[in-house]
């Protein structure tokens, strides 16, 4: 087709851009033929029978990799983005992929004043970003400025046959992401020649995908070197071919009137970078989307459910509203943290608060916990609201998922001087306790603990049942025949006995377990299998989504839509990132999913087999799956549920192999090895961690516990040898207290070392020093958990003798 026709058919927002060598040549980059000629010259002999990957391997073998990389970089040293390349950032593409080594595209975004993230290896996925990039560029063959010769142990320019073999997993991860995106987007491949083997490989992969999933999307080829015969063959296979260069194409795209849109639209208050991950409650139509039946059966109330009067008032509502609305004591009014066990109604209470504040003329924003949290644009938004004196509140449900970034936000805000920007943070009790929180949560906020229903709340619930027609219609069959006194008596007994998961649970005469198991039994057999898998994975901490289920459970992609429609009463699907094909699945409530998991995966070996299958199918390209890895290590229903430490470690090693840039599985493996007294293996893992990452608080702690274990559990060594290890542990514990002065887990190390030292020397001086450090931290940080730690250590020592003091398992 003509270039002008191609330009008319392309809509960048629904088109994936795939750049081959032909895209970089107009900006001065060498072609494959140029690079091969240079490598031949380095060998000073004819090696024309070898392709580029073979000739570069020969150069590496004979002259060394540093020489190979030096020669390669010389060919890229003076190139700059020109014309067409500079136009790519003007449009918001559905995705960008490249087989090129150069940094032309990154430079083009920089010249336009825009940020682009380049993914060059598996280690780049987990990089912490202050704000979302305008574009992510997936570089399938690595990057010219990152190779192991520069000290990058986890990056390599993929050019030799060995490189291709060793980094095949990384490339397959990228291609799997591309496959998922092709379901909803067209593909535009820009290359130099139809004979390019990389272009041929990509065409083959895209065609396999289209045939497998019956995708209606189009694939276009823009090729510089004309070859009508090959074009005829590709067009016969369903691709559409145009000949021309990058510069000419973008000139035609500009003529076609294609909208220039390189960033998200935004209202004047919310920073554009966080619009995709934020619900602006004030802008919602609360007359729509209410579903009392789903809420009655266990789902949290939506904003619309609250607006329609389908919920009852919790005792904490007024206290939290007063906290947020008062400025008389700003040091206690900036953050409200809602904590409670799963099932007590935290999310519903938060929705009530959000709707109530919006009616009071607050600007109310709700961060989607399945999306990344970027502290820098939220910092800018908070400061703007404060300057303009706009009352604003940010709700953070499941705040523990993004606590590192949220800590950065609250630490960066001068909360003592702020009056208009507030935060409501919500977390499960278990996930909240063991994480490190910023002192600001305690110094400038209040913690509200939500438990089972009180007498006042039961009265509110009874009033709701009696006076709301929709609720009454669902509830009264269970209450038929009882007078108001008897209804209250039964509600009170049930609400005290069980967590408040759903109205149906409290009102019905059966136990929640029986209610849920009967629902399960009523499903068709194929749906039961999917439901139990989703429930088990969700309970284990995995964020379940459609692509993950297809990959790990062997479902036919074409059948998934029908399955989710038939499971509509128990599982909901919602859009996380449609561009990447991410549609998440969620049970009605975590407590209900946990019940299904408990009964339907009561065999630990079957549960372990499920985790193995899922871990082996994970793709670190997806952020939602990186979160899953972290949760799976932390959650007591995840890997810690498996009783065998050796089997836990096998799963953790699989995780590390699949996602080497993730720290949490490495932490969990080291912790297990130490608790199992496998000290040499633990030391090896610590050493490898420090060679690939900077030292962090957990690894410093593990180094301390490693030396404590050496001193106290190594048989046959003298006292002076034990004191040597204790001395090293003490040195690192002191360093940890200085380096991580707000981290209660680092501050407790002196007490742990002090106890071990007392066992050897009967000297309690170091232990007392550790207690003083904790007490000082309690006064300065305000974290009540530190006071509990002090009490714990004082009880452990007290008046007991040395041989009664035991070193406890590591705590995180």
Image (cartoon, rainbow, N blue to C red):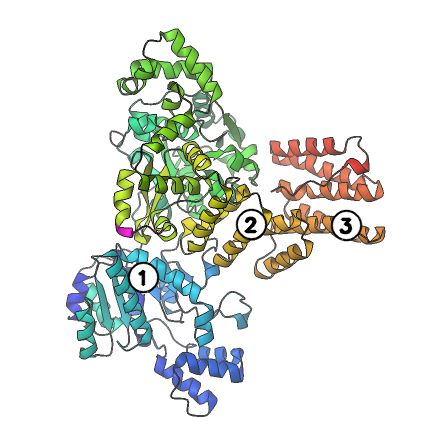
Residue at which label 1 appears: 89
Which image quarter is the C terminus in? top right
- Residue 52 lies, in percent from the top left, at 40, 80
Residue numbers of the magenta segment:
554-558
* Gap in angstroms between the C-alphas marked 2 and 3: 28 Å
**The quarter of the displayed image where residue 386 is located:** top left
The mark found on residue 653 in the picture is none
Q: Secondary structure at mark 2?
A: helix
| Closer to the eye: label 2 or 3 | 2
The answer to whether any part of residue 677 appears in the image is: yes
Q: As rendered, which of 417 and 5 lies closer to the eye?
A: 5
Seen at 47% across and 44% down, the residue is 607
Q: Is residue 268 left or right of residue 369?
A: left
In the rendered image, which residue does mark 2 sit on? 647
Label 3 sits on a secondary structure element that is: helix
The residue drawn where x is 21% and y is 79% is 226
Name the residue: 68% across, 57% down. Answer: 680
Which labelled disc corresponds to residue 711?
Answer: 3
Q: Is residue 298 left or right of residue 661?
A: left
Q: Residues within 10 Å of mark 2 (few under 14, many from 20)?
A: some
- Chain-order first, disc 1 or disc 3: 1
Query: Height in image: 20 above or below 319?
Result: below
Bin the neighbour count of mark 3 within 10 Å (Cα to Cα): few under 14, some 14-19, many 20 and up. Answer: many
What percent of the width, then of the height, locates residue 3? 18, 70
Q: Nearer the viewer, mark 1 or mark 3?
A: 3
Of the image marks 2 and 3, the number of the one nearer the N terminus: 2
| Residue at 28% over, 43% down | 563
733 left or right of 641 in image: right
């Amino acid at each position: 087709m003509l270039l002008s026709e191609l330009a008319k058919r392309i809509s960048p927002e629904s088109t994936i851009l795939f750049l081959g060598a032909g895209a970089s040549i107009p900006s001065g980059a060498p072609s494959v033929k140029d690079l091969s000629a240079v490598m031949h010259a380095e060998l000073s002999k004819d090696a024309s029978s070898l392709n580029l990957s073979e000739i570069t391997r020969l150069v590496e073998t004979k002259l060394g990799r540093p020489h190979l990389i030096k020669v390669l970089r010389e060919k890229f040293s003076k190139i700059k983005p020109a014309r067409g390349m500079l136009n790519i950032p003007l449009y918001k593409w559905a995705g960008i992929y490249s087989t090129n080594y150069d940094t032309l595209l990154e430079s083009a975004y920089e010249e336009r004043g825009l940020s682009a993230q380049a993914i060059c290896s598996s280690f780049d996925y987990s990089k912490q970003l202050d704000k979302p990039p305008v574009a992510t560029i997936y570089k399938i063959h690595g990057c010219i400025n990152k190779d192991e010769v520069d000290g990058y142990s986890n990056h390599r320019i993929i050019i030799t046959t060995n490189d291709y073999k060793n980094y095949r997993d990384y490339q397959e991860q990228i291609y799997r992401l591309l496959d998922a995106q092709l379901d909803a987007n067209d593909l535009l491949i820009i290359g130099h020649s139809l004979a390019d083997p990389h272009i041929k490989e990509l065409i083959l992969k895209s065609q396999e995908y289209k045939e497998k999933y019956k995708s209606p999307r189009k694939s276009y080829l823009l090729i510089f070197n004309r070859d009508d015969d090959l074009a005829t063959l590709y067009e016969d296979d369903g691709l559409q071919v145009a000949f021309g260069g990058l510069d000419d194409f973008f000139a035609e795209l500009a003529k076609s009137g294609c909208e220039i849109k390189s960033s998200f639209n935004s209202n004047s208050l919310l920073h554009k970078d966080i619009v995709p991950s934020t619900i602006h409650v004030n802008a919602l139509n609360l007359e729509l989307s209410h579903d009392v039946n789903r809420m009655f059966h266990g789902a949290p109330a939506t904003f619309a459910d609250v607006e329609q009067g389908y919920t009852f008032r919790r005792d904490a509502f007024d206290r939290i509203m007063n906290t947020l609305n008062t400025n008389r004591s700003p040091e206690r009014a900036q953050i409200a943290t809602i904590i409670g066990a799963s099932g007590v109604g935290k999310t519903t209470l938060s929705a009530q608060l959000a709707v109530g504040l919006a009616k009071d003329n607050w600007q109310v924003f709700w961060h989607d916990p399945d999306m990344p949290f970027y502290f820098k644009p939220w910092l800018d938004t908070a400061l703007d609201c404060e300057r303009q004196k706009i009352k604003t509140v940010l709700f953070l449900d499941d705040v523990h998922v993004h606590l590192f970034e949220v800590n950065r936000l609250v630490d960066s805000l001068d909360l003592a001087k702020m009056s208009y920007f507030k935060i409501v943070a919500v977390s499960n009790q278990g996930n909240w306790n063991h994480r490190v929180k910023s002192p600001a949560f305690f110094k400038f906020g209040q913690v509200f603990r939500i438990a089972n229903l009180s007498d006042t709340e039961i009265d509110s619930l009874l009033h709701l049942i009696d006076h709301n027609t929709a609720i009454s219609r669902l509830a009264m069959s269970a209450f038929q025949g009882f007078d108001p006194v008897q209804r209250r008596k039964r509600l009170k007994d049930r609400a005290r006995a069980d967590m408040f998961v759903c109205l149906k649970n409290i009102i019905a005469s059966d136990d929640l377990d029986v209610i849920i198991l009967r629902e399960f039994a009523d499903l068709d057999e194929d749906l039961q299998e999917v439901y139990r898998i989703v429930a088990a994975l969700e309970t284990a901490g995995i964020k379940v989504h459609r692509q993950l289920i297809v990959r790990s459970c062997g479902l036919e992609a074409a059948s998934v839509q029908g399955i989710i429609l038939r499971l509509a009463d128990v599982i909901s699907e919602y859009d996380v990132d449609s561009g990447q094909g991410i549609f998440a699945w969620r049970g009605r409530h975590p407590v209900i999913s946990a019940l299904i998991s408990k009964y339907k995966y009561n065999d630990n070996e079957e549960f372990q087999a499920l985790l193995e299958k899922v871990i082996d199918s994970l793709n670190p390209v997806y952020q939602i799956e990186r979160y899953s890895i972290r949760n799976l290590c932390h959650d007591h229903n995840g890997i810690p549920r498996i009783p065998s430490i050796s089997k836990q470690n096998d799963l953790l090693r699989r995780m590390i192999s699949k996602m080497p840039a993730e720290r949490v599985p490495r932490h969990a493996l080291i912790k297990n090895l130490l608790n199992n007294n496998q000290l040499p293996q633990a030391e090896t893992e610590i050493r490898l961690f420090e060679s690939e990452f900077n030292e962090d608080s957990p690894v410093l702690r593990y180094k301390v516990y490693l030396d404590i274990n050496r001193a106290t559990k190594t048989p046959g060594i003298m006292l002076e040898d034990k004191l040597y290890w204790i001395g090293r542990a003490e040195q690192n514990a002191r360093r940890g207290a200085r380096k991580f002065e707000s981290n209660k887990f680092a501050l407790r190390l002196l007490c742990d070392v002090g106890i071990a030292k007392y066992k050897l020397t009967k000297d309690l001086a170091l232990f007392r020093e550790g207690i003083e450090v904790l007490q000082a931290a309690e006064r300065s940080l305000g974290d009540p958990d530190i006071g509990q730690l002090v009490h714990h250590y004082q009880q452990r020592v007290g008046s007991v003798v040395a041989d009664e003091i035991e070193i406890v398992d590591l705590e995180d």
